[in-house]
Image (tube, grey):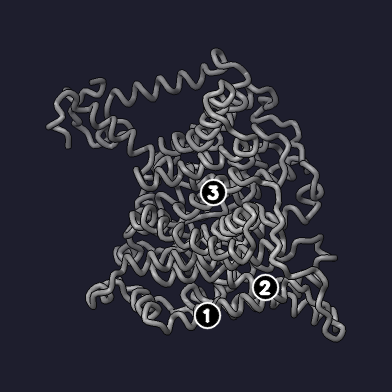
Amino acid sequence: MFYRLSGIHHTRYESARALWPVPADRWQVVALAVLALAAPLFVSNLYLGSYILPWLIWAAAALSLSLLMGLAGQLHFGFAAVMAIGAYSSIHLVRAGVPFELALLGAGVVSALIGTVFGAAALRVKGLYLVMATLAMQYLVDWVIINVPAISGGAQATLRTPAVSFLGLPISTLIERYYFALGWAVLITLFFMNVKRTSFGRALVAIRDKDFAAAVIGVDPFRYKLMAFLTSSFIGGVTGAVLAFCYYRAVTPEQFSFNVSIQLVAMVLVGGLGSAIGGYLGAGFVLLVPIFLTNFIAGLGESGWIYISQNLMAHLPLIFYGAMIIGFLLLEPLGLAKIYDNIRKALLVWPFRHSRS
Amino acid sequence: MAYFLELLVNGALTGLMYSLAALGFVLIYKASGVPNLAQGAMVMAAAYVVWFFTSLGLSVWLAIPLGVATMFLFGLMTERVLLRRMVGQPVIMVVMLTLGMEIVLRGLVPGFLGAAPKPLDIGIGLAPVIIGDVFINREYLVGGVLALALIGGSMLFFRTRTGTKMRAVSDDHVASWAVGLSVERVIGLSWGIAGIAAVGAGTLWGAVQGVDWTLSGLLFPAVAVVILGGVDSITGVLVGGLLVGILGSVIPGYLDSYAGGSTRDVVTSLIILVTIVFRPYGIFGREDIERI
């Protein structure tokens, strides 16, 4: 329908390798960019601040985890800990007088170093053992943050983020924070889409598919796995810092607990492993669907259709969240990105279904 | 010295109770290679089920067999409905599926049966047992002894005809098929037995610390037990449980006052990490030989 392929003839390799070879996709991207840039004009501050802003940042986090899990095939169940390291180190760096721009880089470097140390320890093993090792990392980092008052600002205390400015522009009002988060999410998305086309990305995919085979064609699995951990922890750390400065603005250790790690893995899986659009769809789905479904059931309860106890009401988001994970794994293991892809492919040849490849 | 002995004995007894929670994990992993991260939640569900039957006015000794039957069926159903469709999928899918189950159970069971902690009285009494200078928590003592008996029973079970089938299936699925064993049925049975083990762990832990959702947190020490002992070894569960229990009791006993509390989680994490770095297959586990 919209995706007419007729008349698109690639005469140069560059155009065939472009990120979006089909004009309809390009128009979609332009439309999305315009919508995102104009969002503060037509979205109320409540929605902007409590839905769209966190959605963008969590999508960036899901993409950085997807780099590790989707491209390199390394499981990570302690990614919230990586983000926590980034968040706390950026805040402490800014408090120590480091400019915000450098503090973000510093947060990334610290997370990358610590994340890679754990990654290196875990790289001798894979599958289940990697899950357990990263899980242990999550608990260790949590414990260190909670029990070292110099980091957390005391066991119960929250650490407020100081006022900062980025390249001379202050980041304090909602609009400014929104644009900063948007910029970061766009940057990560572009990086993610392009890394798949580089030799680095292809090497990671080779390792994911079969590490022996990758070694045979000259890709050193250990080195590239380590680099995957390094890259993804770096981005994850900076995203943690962005999350702290743009959304939470007062961080506590619970904001980066084990459950958040699970939530991130769920975002990547529900969205679709190793897909850029999947990061956004997955983050939105995992964050919003349990809330909407719970509100819907609450509405039914209030109108007297069904009776729901207060106690069950409190547990509904958890039930929906878990059921969503199970449902996607059973019905569409490739996630929302695959559903999107199926629809797009159907539209490409509509109404001539038989010509579908 | 008495303080050390006290930590040692109570730690060993707690460790035995951890082993009981870990037993189901090992049974399922041994039979089907599925890491069941919902084992903690199954322990919690089992405790809730037993409590639910007692709250109907039944005596504990009737509620436990009913709980065993319920959880056995629950295990069978889980395998049939969820896990069988995951055969041949990558490990991340299976891990996330069991984690999804964990989350659903953690919402569903307290959601319907009430989140507030509930007492589960199995008639142990509260007075500590005193041997020499050593205070032993009576609940831990009874729990540890019962756990030991149950684990011993499951070791004996592997000598029976059904147990032999289970060992065969855990060795090689295709070869078991070839000699006419129903691999699906055996794997289903392993889930059922894991459900029964969950009733044992759930009842004991429920009696010790009350029945509420925090019981699902047993997953973490259980995982440490399993990793340390070896994921596919029943002996490993016993030894691993003792070690995790003792280390998790003695080290915090001396360090908690300096480090600001909850060093037990740190000890557990370190046990997992050190085992994975130096001996990933655990003390008694079988070393995987991976073919290209």
Closer to the N terminus: mark 3 or mark 1? Answer: 3
Closer to the N terminus: mark 2 or mark 1? Answer: 2
Amino acid at pointer 2 = Gly
SS label for mark 2: helix
Q: In this view, does B255 lie above or below A294?
A: below
Residue that mark 3 sits on = B103
Amino acid at pointer 1 = Gly
Residue sitting farthest toward the top:
A41
Q: Which quarter of the figure has residue A170?
A: top right
In the rendered image, residue A16, in percent from the top left (x then y), is placed at: 24, 35
Q: Which residue is drawn at 28% across and 30% down?
A: A344
The subunit carrying tag 2 is: B
Q: In this view, does B292 lie above or below A327?
A: below
Amino acid at pointer 3 = Ile
In the rendered image, residue B208, in percent from the top left (x then y), is placed at: 71, 64
Q: Which residue is drawn at 60% across and 40% down?
A: A315
Is A259 or B48 nearer to us in this picture? B48
The mark lying in front, picked from 3 and 1, is: 1
Between the residue at mark 2 and the residue at mark 1, the CA separation in whole angstroms equals 15 Å
The reply, left or right, for residue B132 in relation to residue A84 is: right
Residue that mark 2 sits on = B143
